[in-house]
Every structure is written in structure tokens, then in C-alpha cells.
Image: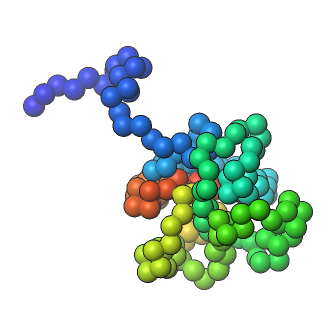
Amino acid sequence: MEKQEHIVPINYVESAPDLEPLWGNWIFRDSVVIQAGEPGISKTTFNYSLAKAIVDNKEFLGVKPTAPDLKVLYLDWESSDSLIKSRMRVMGYPENVDSFYKCNENEATLAQVEQYIKDTKFKFDILFIDPIRMAFAMRDENDNAEASRQAKYLRKLASRYKCAVIAVHHSS
């Protein structure tokens, strides 16, 4: 068995395949971003604003768009249609409304959403999962074993759908 070096100069990464940037230097196709914060600090409102900027190919918080014509699917297990409407009326609906999709059916499981995606061949570039605990129907949002299992699943989702996954975690 060949010995492998684990501590290498930083430029060793140059042999790795390039990822496709979707938004600035922090959202890439085939990658997962975990957004963590206390409940009630407006992570969801922030993400709706980000998603709107992404589909409209507009700057957001000083980050310029990287790729045009992106499609977003937002799985929002905490917001009612009325709350989403209220958010969108305040911030304005995206110009490219046909590129911003949402699913906020409280009874819909992540498996059912995936089945719909497979059945309809629905294509998207960025998938928001908000929050993780409801996507996986978990008991303890801070259980390390569950978090590890979920992280692996999220990486598989990003790879399977050739998308970026942004998952919201309530730290508490």
C-alpha cells in the first residue's frame, strides 16, 4: 500500500477539479453550505432576499452575480403562504419569478419532494432547505450522529441534482 501525504503545501489543491461558482466565492455547484444561527434572527428572510437577488442576477450585500439564469428551489417548512406573501410584498417579487420556486407544504417530506423532482425532471441550481430539523424530522437538532448522517445526505443531494444546497440549522 502506497503511503499518502496528508500535510501538503496549499498549491497541492491545483490538481483538484474546478467547481462551478454560482454566487460569489461561497456558493458552488455540487457543494453544501450550512447556515447556522439562533431561531428568530431572520435567516429565512435573509435567504429569501438572497434567492431573489440570485434569480434576478443582481448584487446582494456587495457580492456580484457569478452565473446568470439560475433557478432556485426553496423548501420552507416554517412559513405559511401568508408570511411568504408578506415578505415578498415588502422586498418585491423577483423580476424572474419563474426562476424562484418554493415548497412550504408542512406535510411534504424531503423524500416526497425528491420524488416530485424525479417524476417531473424539475431542474434547479440552488436548493434551500429551511430548516434541516424539519426536512429530516429529527428529535435533537444538535445530535452529532444525526448531523453527520444528514451532512452526507446533503452532499449526495448536491451531487445528484448538480446543485448547491443551502441548509438552515437552528443552533440552540
- Report the number of discs: 0
* Residue 42 is at least partly visible in this image: yes
Q: Residue visible at 74% across and 43% down?
A: 59
Q: Residue at x 60, y 61 (%)?
A: 71
Indicate the quadrant containing the N terminus: top left, top right, bottom left or bottom right.
top left
What is the quadrant of residue 18 in the picture?
top left
Q: Position of residue 85 (x, y in %)?
A: 82, 73
Where residue 7 appears, x then y in whole percent?
34, 21
Residue 26 higher or lower than 29, as above or below: above
Q: Position of residue 126 (x, y in %)?
A: 57, 57
Residue 145 seen by the camera: no
Q: Is residue 41 left or right of residue 101?
A: right
* Type of colouring: rainbow
Compared to 130, does 54 lie above or below?
A: above
| Residue 84 horizontal/vertical position (percent) | 79, 71
- Residue at horizontal 45%, vertical 41%? 19
- Give the answer, above or below, for where 48 lies relative to 60: below
Q: Quadrant of residue 16?
A: top left
Q: Identify the residue at horizontal 47%, vertical 79% (top origin).
A: 120
In the image as oriented, which residue stretches furthest toward the left?
A: 1
**Closer to us: 160 or 76:** 160
